[in-house]
Amino acid sequence: LRWEWEAASAQLLKEVTSQRAASVFLVPVDDVALGLLDYRRIVKKRMDLGTVAAKLRDGGYKDATAFAADVLLTFNNAMLYNPDFDDVHKLAKKLRGNFEASISAHPLGSLFIEGESEAGSSAKKKEKEVEKVPEGGSA
């Protein structure tokens, strides 16, 4: 039932994007303007919440797990690039936790984590990789 998970996804995304801390994640990282010369080498698949919203609006997700994977990718990228003491890393970690809690509490939450797809395994993998990254700069 596509419309059910799409409506639930829109609700979950609204919950995340309405948080003050989400503002930095609403647009793609402008690595050139910010002088982040190593950003594209470290972050292999770029994602932001504005792109997630557009993709959801345009019917670009095949299922709820693909949607959740992109939201988590947004935060995991920020945590991968920025060291754990950086404010952007801390915001990403907080928002990721809030998003995961919202999924767990949602009546359709199992649709977003079914089978521990990319979303779950990527989150765990990225968490471990964060420690290996040299000091960076932004989301």
Image (spheres, rainbow, N blue to C red):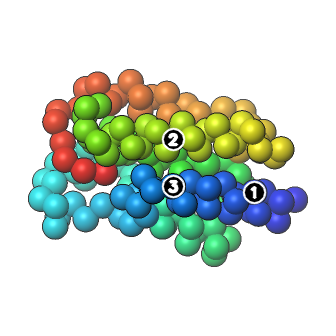
Foreground pick, 116 / 20: 20
Sequence-first disc among 3 and 1: 1
Relative image position of residue 3 (x, y in whole percent): 82, 65
Q: Residue at x 17, y 33 (%)?
A: 134
Residue sitting farthest toward the front: 20
Of badges 2 and 3, the one in the foreground is 3
Sequence-first disc among 2 and 3: 3
Picture quarter with the N terminus:
bottom right
Q: Is residue 43 left or right of residue 101?
A: left
Q: Residue at x 16, y 36 (%)?
A: 135
Q: Amino acid at mark 3?
A: Gln
Residue indicated by mark 3: 19
Residue sitting farthest toward the bottom: 58
Local secondary structure at mark 3: loop
Local secondary structure at mark 2: helix
Residue indicated by mark 2: 96
Q: CA distance from mark 2 to mark 3?
A: 12 Å
Q: Disc count in the image?
A: 3
Residue 8, labelled with which disc? 1
Q: Is residue 81 above or below residue 9?
A: above
Identify the image quadrant of residue 83: top left
Q: Do the numbered discs 3 and 1 sit on residues whose CB atoms are within 8 Å?
A: no
Q: CA distance from mark 1 to mark 2?
A: 17 Å
Of badges 3 and 1, the one in the foreground is 3
